[in-house]
Every structure is written in C-alpha cells, then in structure tokens.
Amino acid sequence: MTERKDLALTEPGCGRPFDESLLTGYLDHALTQEEEQRVRVHLVDCGECRKLTEELAMMRKTTMGTEFRVPSDDQWDERPRGGASGLAFGVGWLMLIVWVVGVVGFALGEAWQGTQSLGEKLAAFGGLSAVVLLLLSVVIDRLRARKSDRYRRVEK
Ligand SMILES: [Zn+2]
C-alpha cells in the first residue's frame, strides 16, 4: 500500500502534467479525447509512466480476473454437489445394475442347466426376472427424477 503511494508520489518528478487517476481512466477508456491524447503523448516520452500504466493495467487485470470468477463461483457452489456426487451416484447405480444382471444371468444359467422340471425353471426364471425388473424400474425412475430436477439446470 505505502509502496504504491510512494511510487505515485515520486512519479510526478517526471513532469507528468496530469494526475495518476488519468492513467487509470486511460486504461478504462474513460477519458475525453483531449485527456487521452495528453496521456498518450506523455506515455510515449516517459518510460516510468509507461511502467506505471502497465502496472496499473496488470492490477486491473487481476481484479477483473477475480471479479470475473465470482459469478461462476455461485455456479460451482451447486455443481460439485450435483456433478461429482451425482456422478458417483450414477456410477454406483450402474455398477449395481451390472452386478445384479451378471449375478442374475449367471444364476439363471445355472438354474436353467441344473433344474429338471419346467415348473422349477419357470419359478426360478420368473422370480429373478421380477427382481431385476423391479430394480430396473426403481433405477430408471431415480435417474429420470435426477435428470429433470437437477441436471437440466446445470448442464447446457
Ligand atoms: Zn511520466
């Protein structure tokens, strides 16, 4: 802070015929044509003020950078929750489905081979199929609910 003030105080030694605030205005393109001209002419001659202007511009950029990040911070607030945990959630369900389908498929194959009567086969097949169908319906409902309430807003 004091460093900046010292710098500003020593600057006019170069004979700059205007206030430092004009440099800021120059960066913001907020000056009148006449003022801008004045600043530009001096900057051509004065390396010190050029440096100061560059410094101001850099500070401006940093500030803008942080300001620019603020609105997206709001979005990020919600996104990791919806995104990361949502992804884990989805993957978890997917793995469960794969696992169940695998186990059930294997069991069905075994049952098909091992059982003798058609009645037993139908009983095994029907029961397992019912479990799978119920599970699938729950999963589909869940995924659909998630998609409509959260994902639509977050994703483009
Ligand atoms: Zn100067």
Image (spheres, rainbow, N blue to C red):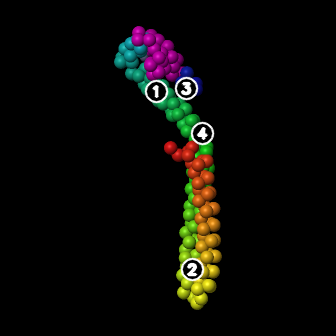
Residue 41 higher or lower than 69, as above or below: above
Mark in the foreground, 1 or 4: 4
Q: Secondary structure at mark 4?
A: helix
Q: Amino acid at mark 3?
A: Glu
How many angstroms separate mark 4 from mark 2 (CA)? 50 Å
The reply to whether discs 4 and 2 touch (Cβ–Cβ < 8 Å) is no
Q: Residue at x 60, y 52 (%)?
A: 146
Q: Is residue 20 magenta?
A: yes
Residue 44 higher or lower than 57, as above or below: above
Residue identified by numbered label 2: 108
Residue identified by numbered label 1: 57
Q: Main secondary structure of the magenta part?
A: helix
**Can see residue 88?**
no
How many angstroms separate mark 3 from mark 2 (CA)? 79 Å
Q: Amino acid at mark 1?
A: Ala
Residue identified by numbered label 3: 3
Give the x, y percent position of residue 119: 62, 85
Q: Amino acid at mark 2?
A: Leu
Residue 61 versus residue 51: which sits nearer the camera?
61
Query: Label for residue 74?
Result: 4
How many angstroms separate mark 1 from mark 4 (CA)? 27 Å
Write down the region rendered in magenta.
Answer: 6-34
Res 26 quadrant in image: top left
Query: Label for residue 116?
Result: none
